[in-house]
Image (spheres, grey):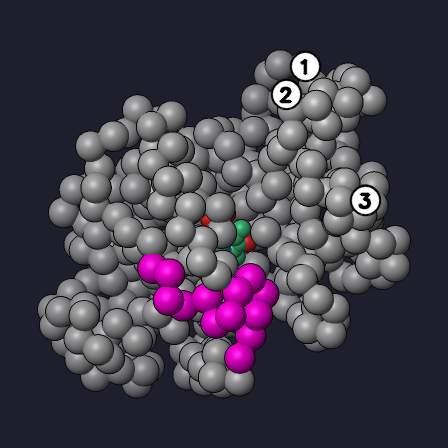
Amino acid sequence: MLSSSFATTDSLNNCGLFDRNISVHVLRLDSYCPVGFSSATGNKYFKLKENIAYAKRNGFQRILSFGGAYSNHIHALALAGSDFEIPTIGIIRGEESFRVNPTLQDAKVAGMHLEFVDRTEYRKRNDSGYLENLQARYPDAYIIPEGGSNNLAVEGCKEILDHARHSIGNSFDHIFVPCGTGATIAGIVASSRKNQNVYGVSVLKNAHYLNEEVVQFLAQESVIENTNWDILHDYHFGGYAKVTDQLKNFVEEFSSKSNIAIEPIYTGKMFYAIFDLIEKQVIPSGASILAIHTGGLQGLRGLHQRQVTTGTDTA
Ligand SMILES: *Cc1c(COP(=O)(O)O)cnc(C)c1O
Protein backbone atom coordinates (compact mmCIF):
# COMPACT_ATOMS: atom_id res chain seq x y z
CA MET A 1 0.00 0.00 0.00
CA LEU A 2 2.89 2.36 -0.51
CA SER A 3 1.52 5.53 -2.01
CA SER A 4 3.08 7.51 -4.77
CA SER A 5 1.62 10.82 -3.58
CA PHE A 6 2.90 12.97 -0.73
CA ALA A 7 1.36 15.08 2.00
CA THR A 8 1.86 18.83 1.59
CA THR A 9 3.82 21.06 3.93
CA ASP A 10 2.65 24.62 4.65
CA SER A 11 4.81 27.39 6.03
CA LEU A 12 3.45 29.51 8.88
CA ASN A 13 6.11 32.14 8.53
CA ASN A 14 4.08 34.78 6.77
CA CYS A 15 0.83 34.67 8.64
CA GLY A 16 1.87 37.04 11.41
CA LEU A 17 1.61 34.50 14.20
CA PHE A 18 5.07 35.21 15.58
CA ASP A 19 8.01 37.43 14.83
CA ARG A 20 11.03 35.57 16.12
CA ASN A 21 13.64 34.17 13.82
CA ILE A 22 12.10 30.72 13.86
CA SER A 23 10.58 28.88 10.94
CA VAL A 24 7.53 26.68 11.36
CA HIS A 25 6.37 24.18 8.76
CA VAL A 26 3.17 22.20 9.14
CA LEU A 27 2.99 18.72 7.66
CA ARG A 28 -0.63 18.46 6.55
CA LEU A 29 -1.56 14.87 7.28
CA ASP A 30 -5.05 16.26 7.86
CA SER A 31 -5.50 16.82 4.14
CA TYR A 32 -3.45 13.89 2.90
CA CYS A 33 -5.58 11.39 1.03
CA PRO A 34 -3.39 8.44 0.03
CA VAL A 35 -3.82 6.53 -3.19
CA GLY A 36 -6.65 4.04 -2.84
CA PHE A 37 -8.34 5.94 -0.04
CA SER A 38 -11.55 7.90 -0.42
CA SER A 39 -10.74 10.46 2.28
CA ALA A 40 -7.96 11.81 4.48
CA THR A 41 -7.65 10.19 7.91
CA GLY A 42 -4.60 11.95 9.39
CA ASN A 43 -2.08 9.92 11.36
CA LYS A 44 -4.59 7.07 11.61
CA TYR A 45 -3.89 6.15 7.99
CA PHE A 46 -0.24 5.53 8.85
CA LYS A 47 -1.22 3.53 11.93
CA LEU A 48 -3.63 1.39 9.93
CA LYS A 49 -1.85 0.79 6.65
CA GLU A 50 0.46 -2.01 7.78
CA ASN A 51 -2.29 -3.50 9.92
CA ILE A 52 -4.66 -3.75 6.98
CA ALA A 53 -1.95 -5.20 4.77
CA TYR A 54 -1.19 -7.75 7.49
CA ALA A 55 -4.84 -8.76 7.87
CA LYS A 56 -5.22 -9.21 4.11
CA ARG A 57 -1.96 -11.10 3.74
CA ASN A 58 -2.91 -13.50 6.50
CA GLY A 59 -6.38 -14.28 5.23
CA PHE A 60 -8.40 -12.55 7.94
CA GLN A 61 -11.95 -11.84 6.81
CA ARG A 62 -12.48 -8.76 8.96
CA ILE A 63 -10.83 -6.33 11.34
CA LEU A 64 -12.05 -5.62 14.85
CA SER A 65 -11.02 -2.73 17.06
CA PHE A 66 -12.05 -0.55 20.00
CA GLY A 67 -12.80 3.12 20.55
CA GLY A 68 -14.89 5.82 22.13
CA ALA A 69 -17.96 7.24 20.43
CA TYR A 70 -15.97 10.04 18.72
CA SER A 71 -12.88 8.01 17.99
CA ASN A 72 -10.71 9.12 15.08
CA HIS A 73 -9.35 5.58 14.93
CA ILE A 74 -12.78 3.96 14.65
CA HIS A 75 -13.74 6.49 11.98
CA ALA A 76 -10.55 5.87 9.98
CA LEU A 77 -10.82 2.09 10.32
CA ALA A 78 -14.40 2.06 9.08
CA LEU A 79 -13.50 4.18 6.04
CA ALA A 80 -10.37 2.18 5.28
CA GLY A 81 -12.32 -1.07 5.61
CA SER A 82 -14.77 0.21 3.03
CA ASP A 83 -11.97 1.37 0.68
CA PHE A 84 -10.10 -1.93 0.93
CA GLU A 85 -13.17 -4.12 1.01
CA ILE A 86 -12.51 -5.74 4.33
CA PRO A 87 -15.44 -5.73 6.77
CA THR A 88 -14.87 -4.02 10.14
CA ILE A 89 -16.26 -4.34 13.64
CA GLY A 90 -16.10 -1.52 16.19
CA ILE A 91 -16.42 -2.24 19.90
CA ILE A 92 -17.64 1.12 21.14
CA ARG A 93 -17.53 2.39 24.69
CA GLY A 94 -20.93 3.81 25.52
CA GLU A 95 -24.57 3.49 24.81
CA GLU A 96 -26.57 2.92 21.66
CA SER A 97 -27.74 6.53 21.88
CA PHE A 98 -24.32 7.52 20.53
CA ARG A 99 -25.34 5.90 17.28
CA VAL A 100 -26.66 9.25 16.08
CA ASN A 101 -23.33 11.06 16.41
CA PRO A 102 -21.54 12.00 13.16
CA THR A 103 -18.49 9.78 13.80
CA LEU A 104 -20.49 6.60 14.30
CA GLN A 105 -22.96 7.58 11.62
CA ASP A 106 -20.09 7.71 9.10
CA ALA A 107 -18.72 4.43 10.44
CA LYS A 108 -22.07 2.77 9.97
CA VAL A 109 -22.51 4.14 6.47
CA ALA A 110 -19.04 2.78 5.65
CA GLY A 111 -20.32 -0.64 6.70
CA MET A 112 -18.77 -1.02 10.13
CA HIS A 113 -20.62 -3.32 12.49
CA LEU A 114 -20.96 -1.49 15.81
CA GLU A 115 -21.18 -3.17 19.19
CA PHE A 116 -21.78 -1.03 22.25
CA VAL A 117 -20.31 -2.07 25.59
CA ASP A 118 -20.43 -0.42 29.01
CA ARG A 119 -17.38 1.05 30.72
CA THR A 120 -16.75 -2.05 32.81
CA GLU A 121 -16.55 -4.26 29.76
CA TYR A 122 -14.62 -1.68 27.76
CA ARG A 123 -11.96 -1.56 30.45
CA LYS A 124 -11.14 -5.21 29.65
CA ARG A 125 -10.14 -4.39 26.08
CA ASN A 126 -6.49 -5.37 26.63
CA ASP A 127 -7.09 -8.37 28.93
CA SER A 128 -5.97 -11.63 27.37
CA GLY A 129 -9.01 -13.60 28.58
CA TYR A 130 -11.40 -11.03 27.17
CA LEU A 131 -9.53 -10.92 23.87
CA GLU A 132 -9.58 -14.74 23.62
CA ASN A 133 -13.36 -14.69 24.05
CA LEU A 134 -13.72 -12.01 21.38
CA GLN A 135 -11.49 -14.01 19.06
CA ALA A 136 -13.62 -17.11 19.68
CA ARG A 137 -16.72 -15.11 18.80
CA TYR A 138 -15.07 -13.70 15.68
CA PRO A 139 -12.54 -16.36 14.66
CA ASP A 140 -11.87 -14.75 11.29
CA ALA A 141 -11.20 -11.28 12.71
CA TYR A 142 -7.85 -9.57 13.11
CA ILE A 143 -8.00 -7.65 16.39
CA ILE A 144 -6.26 -4.26 16.62
CA PRO A 145 -5.94 -2.45 19.98
CA GLU A 146 -7.59 0.88 20.78
CA GLY A 147 -6.16 3.78 18.79
CA GLY A 148 -4.69 1.23 16.36
CA SER A 149 -1.55 1.29 18.49
CA ASN A 150 0.65 -1.76 18.00
CA ASN A 151 4.04 -2.33 16.43
CA LEU A 152 2.62 -2.45 12.90
CA ALA A 153 1.25 1.06 13.59
CA VAL A 154 4.72 2.22 14.61
CA GLU A 155 6.09 0.65 11.44
CA GLY A 156 3.56 2.61 9.33
CA CYS A 157 4.34 5.87 11.13
CA LYS A 158 7.97 5.59 10.06
CA GLU A 159 6.77 6.87 6.68
CA ILE A 160 5.50 10.19 8.09
CA LEU A 161 8.79 12.10 8.00
CA ASP A 162 9.38 11.05 4.38
CA HIS A 163 6.48 13.33 3.47
CA ALA A 164 8.17 16.31 5.08
CA ARG A 165 11.54 15.46 3.55
CA HIS A 166 9.93 15.27 0.15
CA SER A 167 8.88 18.92 0.30
CA ILE A 168 11.32 20.68 2.66
CA GLY A 169 14.27 18.31 2.88
CA ASN A 170 15.82 17.54 6.22
CA SER A 171 16.30 21.10 7.39
CA PHE A 172 13.97 20.91 10.41
CA ASP A 173 15.55 20.41 13.82
CA HIS A 174 12.51 20.39 16.13
CA ILE A 175 9.61 18.04 15.40
CA PHE A 176 6.30 18.27 17.28
CA VAL A 177 3.43 15.79 17.29
CA PRO A 178 0.40 15.37 19.59
CA CYS A 179 0.57 12.23 21.65
CA GLY A 180 -2.20 9.90 22.83
CA THR A 181 -0.78 6.39 23.05
CA GLY A 182 2.75 7.14 21.84
CA ALA A 183 2.70 4.90 18.75
CA THR A 184 2.88 7.78 16.27
CA ILE A 185 5.79 9.53 17.98
CA ALA A 186 7.61 6.19 18.25
CA GLY A 187 7.46 5.78 14.46
CA ILE A 188 8.66 9.34 14.02
CA VAL A 189 11.56 8.93 16.44
CA ALA A 190 12.53 5.66 14.75
CA SER A 191 12.85 7.46 11.42
CA SER A 192 14.33 10.74 12.67
CA ARG A 193 17.93 11.83 12.57
CA LYS A 194 19.87 12.09 15.79
CA ASN A 195 20.25 15.85 15.44
CA GLN A 196 16.48 16.30 15.25
CA ASN A 197 14.61 16.67 18.53
CA VAL A 198 11.17 15.08 18.62
CA TYR A 199 8.57 16.35 21.10
CA GLY A 200 5.30 14.57 21.81
CA VAL A 201 2.68 16.81 23.37
CA SER A 202 0.65 14.61 25.72
CA VAL A 203 -3.07 15.31 25.45
CA LEU A 204 -3.70 13.32 28.62
CA LYS A 205 -3.19 14.41 32.19
CA ASN A 206 -0.41 12.78 34.24
CA ALA A 207 0.35 10.36 31.44
CA HIS A 208 3.93 9.83 32.54
CA TYR A 209 3.64 6.15 31.60
CA LEU A 210 3.76 7.39 27.98
CA ASN A 211 7.53 7.74 28.20
CA GLU A 212 7.83 4.03 29.00
CA GLU A 213 5.31 3.11 26.26
CA VAL A 214 7.41 4.93 23.68
CA VAL A 215 10.54 3.15 24.92
CA GLN A 216 8.69 -0.19 24.51
CA PHE A 217 7.48 0.65 21.01
CA LEU A 218 11.00 1.70 20.05
CA ALA A 219 12.47 -1.49 21.49
CA GLN A 220 10.10 -3.52 19.28
CA GLU A 221 11.57 -1.62 16.36
CA SER A 222 15.04 -2.47 17.68
CA VAL A 223 15.60 1.24 18.16
CA ILE A 224 17.26 1.66 21.52
CA GLU A 225 19.89 4.27 20.91
CA ASN A 226 17.56 7.15 19.93
CA THR A 227 17.26 9.48 22.89
CA ASN A 228 16.44 12.57 20.84
CA TRP A 229 12.84 12.74 22.05
CA ASP A 230 10.72 13.80 24.99
CA ILE A 231 7.07 13.90 26.01
CA LEU A 232 5.73 17.27 27.18
CA HIS A 233 3.28 16.78 30.03
CA ASP A 234 2.20 20.38 30.68
CA TYR A 235 -0.20 21.02 27.80
CA HIS A 236 -3.13 18.70 28.53
CA PHE A 237 -5.47 21.52 29.65
CA GLY A 238 -7.06 19.36 32.30
CA GLY A 239 -6.98 16.00 30.54
CA TYR A 240 -8.21 14.05 27.60
CA ALA A 241 -10.82 15.94 25.56
CA LYS A 242 -10.85 18.71 28.16
CA VAL A 243 -10.97 22.20 26.69
CA THR A 244 -10.49 25.51 28.50
CA ASP A 245 -11.52 28.96 27.19
CA GLN A 246 -7.84 29.78 26.75
CA LEU A 247 -7.35 26.76 24.50
CA LYS A 248 -10.58 27.41 22.64
CA ASN A 249 -9.55 31.01 21.92
CA PHE A 250 -6.12 29.92 20.82
CA VAL A 251 -7.57 27.36 18.40
CA GLU A 252 -9.90 29.96 16.91
CA GLU A 253 -7.17 32.56 16.47
CA PHE A 254 -4.72 30.07 15.03
CA SER A 255 -7.26 28.68 12.57
CA SER A 256 -8.32 32.09 11.31
CA LYS A 257 -4.80 33.57 11.00
CA SER A 258 -3.15 30.54 9.44
CA ASN A 259 -6.08 29.20 7.45
CA ILE A 260 -5.25 25.79 8.83
CA ALA A 261 -8.14 24.18 10.66
CA ILE A 262 -7.19 22.54 13.94
CA GLU A 263 -9.22 21.06 16.80
CA PRO A 264 -8.67 21.38 20.56
CA ILE A 265 -8.32 17.70 21.44
CA TYR A 266 -4.99 16.95 19.76
CA THR A 267 -3.55 19.49 17.33
CA GLY A 268 -4.74 22.53 19.32
CA LYS A 269 -2.73 21.37 22.33
CA MET A 270 0.32 20.72 20.16
CA PHE A 271 0.28 24.16 18.50
CA TYR A 272 -0.33 25.81 21.85
CA ALA A 273 2.78 24.08 23.19
CA ILE A 274 4.85 25.22 20.20
CA PHE A 275 3.77 28.84 20.59
CA ASP A 276 4.33 28.77 24.33
CA LEU A 277 7.85 27.35 23.96
CA ILE A 278 8.70 29.95 21.31
CA GLU A 279 7.32 32.70 23.55
CA LYS A 280 9.34 31.46 26.53
CA GLN A 281 12.43 31.23 24.31
CA VAL A 282 12.87 27.57 25.18
CA ILE A 283 13.05 27.03 21.45
CA PRO A 284 16.10 29.02 20.41
CA SER A 285 16.21 31.69 17.75
CA GLY A 286 17.10 30.21 14.37
CA ALA A 287 15.26 26.95 15.03
CA SER A 288 13.36 25.22 12.26
CA ILE A 289 10.20 23.52 13.50
CA LEU A 290 8.16 20.81 11.84
CA ALA A 291 4.66 20.53 13.33
CA ILE A 292 2.78 17.40 12.37
CA HIS A 293 -0.91 18.08 11.82
CA THR A 294 -2.34 14.67 12.63
CA GLY A 295 -5.91 15.45 11.54
CA GLY A 296 -8.76 14.68 13.90
CA LEU A 297 -11.10 17.25 12.39
CA GLN A 298 -13.90 14.72 11.97
CA GLY A 299 -14.18 14.69 15.76
CA LEU A 300 -14.92 18.42 15.79
CA ARG A 301 -18.42 17.72 14.57
CA GLY A 302 -19.18 15.95 17.82
CA LEU A 303 -17.35 18.40 20.05
CA HIS A 304 -20.37 20.15 21.45
CA GLN A 305 -22.04 16.85 22.10
CA ARG A 306 -18.85 15.63 23.73
CA GLN A 307 -18.55 18.57 26.07
CA VAL A 308 -21.94 17.90 27.56
CA THR A 309 -21.19 14.19 27.91
CA THR A 310 -18.43 13.24 30.30
CA GLY A 311 -15.27 11.33 29.69
CA THR A 312 -15.91 10.17 26.13
CA ASP A 313 -12.94 9.76 23.94
CA THR A 314 -11.56 10.08 20.44
CA ALA A 315 -8.36 8.05 20.77
C1 LIG B 1 -4.96 9.33 17.58
C2 LIG B 1 -4.47 10.72 17.36
C3 LIG B 1 -3.25 11.17 17.87
C4 LIG B 1 -2.41 10.34 18.79
O1 LIG B 1 -1.70 9.30 18.19
P1 LIG B 1 -0.95 8.23 19.11
O2 LIG B 1 -0.31 7.32 18.15
O3 LIG B 1 -2.04 7.51 19.88
O4 LIG B 1 -0.04 8.92 20.03
C5 LIG B 1 -2.83 12.45 17.55
N1 LIG B 1 -3.60 13.26 16.80
C6 LIG B 1 -4.79 12.88 16.31
C7 LIG B 1 -5.59 13.84 15.52
C8 LIG B 1 -5.27 11.59 16.57
O5 LIG B 1 -6.46 11.22 16.09
Left or right: where 282 falls relative to 60: left
The kind of residue on which mark 3 rests is Val
The residue drawn where x is 30% and y is 76% is 276
Q: Is 185 one of the magenta-colored residues?
A: no
- Mark 1 C-beta to ligand 1 under 8 Å: no
Q: Residues within 10 Å of mark 3 (few under 14, many from 20)?
A: some
Q: Is residue 33 above or below residue 134?
A: below
Residue underneath mark 2: 56
The residue drawn where x is 32% and y is 82% is 17
Q: Position of residue 171 (x, y in %)?
A: 17, 54
Q: Position of residue 305 (x, y in %)?
A: 74, 71
Left or right: where 230 falls relative to 206: left
C-alpha distance separating marks 3 and 1: 28 Å
Q: Is residue 263 above or below residue 186?
A: below
Q: Which mark is residue 59?
A: 1
Q: Which residues are magenta?
A: 232-244
Residue underneath mark 3: 117
Left or right: where 102 falls relative to 229: right
Q: Earlier in the sequence, mark 3 or mark 1?
A: 1
The kind of residue on which mark 2 rests is Lys
Q: Earlier in the sequence, mark 2 or mark 3?
A: 2
